[in-house]
Amino acid sequence: MSIDWNWALVVVGALLVLIEVALGGFTGFDLVLIGSSMALGGTLGLIFGSVPVGLGLASALSLAYIALGRRWVRERLRHRPVASNVDAVVGQRALVAACVAEHQPGQVKVRDEVWRAVPAPGVSGPFETGAVVTVQAIDGVTLQVR
């Protein structure tokens, strides 16, 4: 019994894609792209009726992905932390909505949110309604502004 290598490439490529799906993208889509390269090479080998064409294309596509495409794919999949919630507020400009004084907390509007605010330590106040301030720090749910 002779092995049809083009069909073997198609089957192994499909299995690699299924394994990647089962792992939930754990390998960073490497198995999907290498499996797709193998399946595509095998399919073209079947179309042209040539085992060397199938093996050559599968090899060339897999090597091209490893040499050129892998870095690009990894860069697109890399997790970049996005400042959110409290971390996103520090350093932002805010509009004073209610007078902010040392012994009288007021309110400031940062983007579309209204926060309780006090002057930052060492900063003289008060800040009147309509003034633009910068968020220096956060203490609990109170912004410290300058």
Image: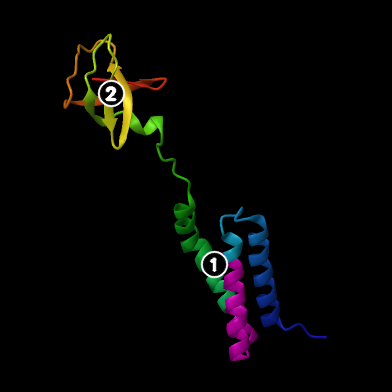
Gap between marks 2 and 1 measured at Cα: 60 Å
Q: Residue at x 63, y 91 (%)?
A: 49
Q: Position of residue 105 (x, y in %)?
A: 29, 15
Q: What residue type is disc 2 on? A: Gln
Q: Position of residue 58 (x, y in %)?
A: 59, 75
Q: Position of residue 46 (x, y in %)?
A: 63, 87
Magenta segment: 33-56
Q: Is residue 16 magenta?
A: no
Q: Residue at x 58, y 77 (%)?
A: 40
> 122 or 108, which lies in front?
108
Residue 113 falls in image quadrant: top left
What crowding class fits label 2: few (fewer than 14 Cα within 10 Å), some (14-19), or many (20 or more)?
many
Q: Compared to 52, does 104 lie above or below?
A: above
Q: Nearer the viewer, mark 2 or mark 1?
A: 2
> 111 or 68, which lies in front?
111
Residue 34 falls in image quadrant: bottom right
Q: Quick one: SS at disc 1?
A: helix
Q: Compared to 86, does 5 lie above or below?
A: below
Q: What residue type is disc 1 on? A: Leu
Q: Position of residue 54 (x, y in %)?
A: 61, 81
Q: Earlier in the sequence, mark 2 or mark 1?
A: 1
Q: Quadrant of the C terminus?
A: top left
Q: Residue at x 66, y 71 (%)?
A: 14
Q: Quick one: SS at disc 2?
A: strand
